[in-house]
Amino acid sequence: MSPRKRKAINADDIRKLLPLFIGVLSPKQQLFLQEHYYQGLSLAEVARRHGVSRQAVLDAVSHGEKKLLKLGSCLEPRSVCQHESTLADVKNALQALRDRIAREGIIYSPRWIVEELEALLQRLETASERHNP
């Protein structure tokens, strides 16, 4: 049986993301990723240097890469950040609606309030479906 192959990771992406998000990684992930990507050490060399198994280094590096790439995807348009932007827009619209109700009061029919709330709920549902397929 052949050894498990690692998914190809763009080393330049990791080198760019590591300084931005290093604080969210565990100390071992920080150390192993820096030695592997900046010092050019192989996983086996990192393992020997720290007296751990190659598998332990592989696990730490793989989990660190996944974290970095997930956080890095937020830097790209049409990603998690877009979802967060939609939520911020809906929050602002709800605050504006609250202010409008406080300013104008409800004189005749609350239909306009219901319609605006339904539109905002629809935006939230759409954003949620896109974010959690």
Image: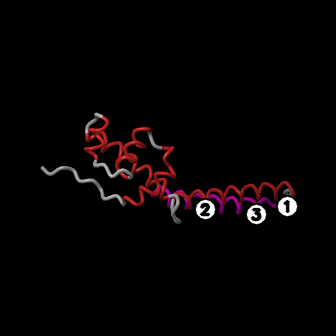
Q: In this view, does 92 lie above or below 30?
A: below
Query: Mark 3 falls on what kind of element?
Result: helix
Magenta-drawn stretch contains 123? yes
User: Where is residue 83 shown, x and y percent of the image?
Assistant: 56, 59
Give coordinates of residue 40: x percent, y percent: 33, 52
Which label belongs to residue 123? 2
Q: Quick one: 24 or 128, which is closer to the camera?
A: 24
Q: Mark 3 and mark 1: span between their CA atoms? A: 10 Å
Q: Is residue 20 left or right of residue 63?
A: right
- Circle 1 packing at 10 Å, graded few (<14), some (14-19), many (20+), is few
Residue lying farthest top?
A: 51
Disc 2: CA contacts within 10 A as few (<14), some (14-19) or many (>=20)? some
Which residue type does callout 1 highlight?
Answer: Tyr
Residue under label 1, please give it: 108
The answer to whether residue 76 is above or below residue 45 is: below
Q: Which mark is residue 50?
A: none
Compared with 105, 46 (above or below) is: above
Q: In which quarter of the image is the C terminus?
A: bottom left
| Cα–Cα span, label 1 and label 2 | 27 Å
CA gap between label 3 and label 2 equals: 17 Å
Residue 24 position within the rendered picture, expressed as x and y whole percent measured from the top left = 49, 44
Q: Where is residue 13 in the image (x, y as percent from the top left)?
A: 42, 59
State how many labels appear. Answer: 3
Q: Nearer the viewer, residue 62 or 82?
A: 62
Q: Quadrant of residue 110?
A: bottom right
Residue in front for this viewpoint, 61 or 7: 61
The residue segment tinted magenta is: 107-133
Residue beneath disc 3: 112
The residue mark sitting in front, 3 or 2, is: 2
Q: Which amino acid does label 2 sit on?
A: Arg
Point 36% across, 60% down: residue: 10
